[in-house]
Image (cartoon, rainbow, N blue to C red):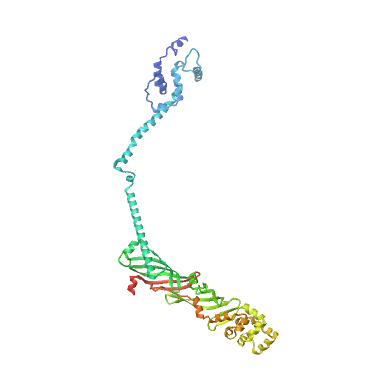
Amino acid sequence: MFSPLFGHSPHSARDPEREVDQKSEQDPEREVPQDAESGSEQEPEQTPEQGSEPERHSEPEQVSKQDPDREGEPERHSEPEQDSKQDPAPEREPAPEREPAPEREPAPERESQQEPEQQPEQESGRQPEPERAGRRGGRGRLGRVPLTTKLVAGLLAGATLLVVADRCAAMYAEKRAEQTLRDKLGLAATPDVHIHGFPFLTQLLGKRLDGVDVTVPDAPAGRVTLAEVRAEATDIRLDGDLPLPVDGARAARVNGDVLLAFDDLDRELGTPAQVKFRALDRQSVRADGELPVAGRVVRIHAVAHIRRDGDRGVSTSVSGMRLDVPGIATYRPGRPARLRLHPQAAEKISHDKSKARALLAVPSVARQLGVAPEDTGPAMRDDKRLGRITGRPGFKEKLMRANLVDLVADRPETLERVGVDPVLARALVRLRAQDLSERVAFSFQLPKQVKGLRLRNITVERDGIRADLTGSGLAVGTARSADD
């Protein structure tokens, strides 16, 4: 029993160099402690299989090789031995080889640290290549753009310039046409011209335009002013040395409309009589206003019927003209002229005996009231008989229909007794129907400078009188001079 104890003591008979060789062969992870003891800078090569082997397999193998005498002992006896190593007895010293055991894990970390060190070396070798390529030949980002992209960009830029140039030329032509129309037609306002079609330059070189829209505001037309004249000319042939200037043009077809606004009629015709125009129906216009007569304000009413005057004009015929003295009488000029009482005045006369006797004293008025001559005398003397006449059914309506024009010249005092101012009545009768009609009548003609246009479908709308505009062969400039 004592021979193995003394012959194989770990302190006397163990060979350190031999033990180290055995450990390096059996456990490659023990390289770190070996370096720590020997101070050598060499690192043994490790295969991936050895580096990835779990550590839990190396510890039992290490214990079996370091202590061959303890082979065959159960696994449970190894734990007390480790406890004894941590708390060694006084006669035994801890083995120096087992202290660096916790340093076994840094071995994989060295491998991971070596890889980042190698990557910068590889990247440092690749990085200068794009820089040298960029400097070589003086090419930048534009040099890397494909040729097709450059061609497309160039075509787009050229097309944009052509479009801009075409629109500028069209705008210039429109301005020239607007100025020409204003000068030739003697317009107060500059018209608006818009040329159809794209491109414009090809049409100009071909001396033919697809279409042109023309809008003329405030076009003079006789006594009135047309609020708006709109026309669309198509298939236009140009005259002159092209591209510029254009001396004349001829349009194959023209379509549009004209508008005579009620606001313009109120301003131009309603000033002396303060007349307002409004639509009565699709062919008639109603005129209502005020007219000063003999120091009194008389209301004027009329109806103007629209009709076409030839192919190029519109005129009106006035009917229903009347002048009202509010609350007293209404005067209607014409043949015959009529001066009639208002309902308020007729009501007062029927209840006033003195006024009724004044009217019955005039034989022409008595006949209109349906009173026989044999009844007139007794009614003039007896109030009861007068009351029977004025109280008859329909007497008031007969008073309103009676014409008092004869009293204006023959019995002006009678008018005064029934409440009608003879001075005002005389002034009303002197007004001629023609003069009154001219105050509300109107007409217009298309400008003489524009030939080949006709008016169709004249109607009265809410905002004014509108007519369709048609024509063919409309000539302007040198083309018109040739026709003349």
Tell me if 475 is positioned left or right of 460 in this view. Answer: left
- Of 78 and 218, the residue lying toward us: 218
Residue 191 appears at what percent x and percent y?
41, 66
- Find residue 119 and report its image quarter: top left
Name the residue furthest top.
2
The percent position of residue 431, horizontal first and vertical second, equals 53, 80
Left of 22 or right of it: where is 414? right
Residue at the spot x=64%, y=89% of the render?
A: 373
Indicate the quadrant where residue 196 lies. Answer: bottom left
159 relative to 343, above or below: above
Instruction: Kindly indicate the quadrant of the structure image that contains residue 23.
Output: top left
Q: Nearer the viewer, residue 198 or 421?
A: 421
Is residue 83 positioned above or below 408 on the image?
Answer: above
The residue that appears at 39% across and 31% down in the rendered structure is 116
Question: Can residue 394 be seen by looking at this rendering?
Answer: no
Return the x and y of residue 109 as percentages of the image width and height.
42, 28
Query: x and y percent of residue 364 in the render?
Result: 60, 87
Q: Is residue 153 above or below residue 206?
A: above
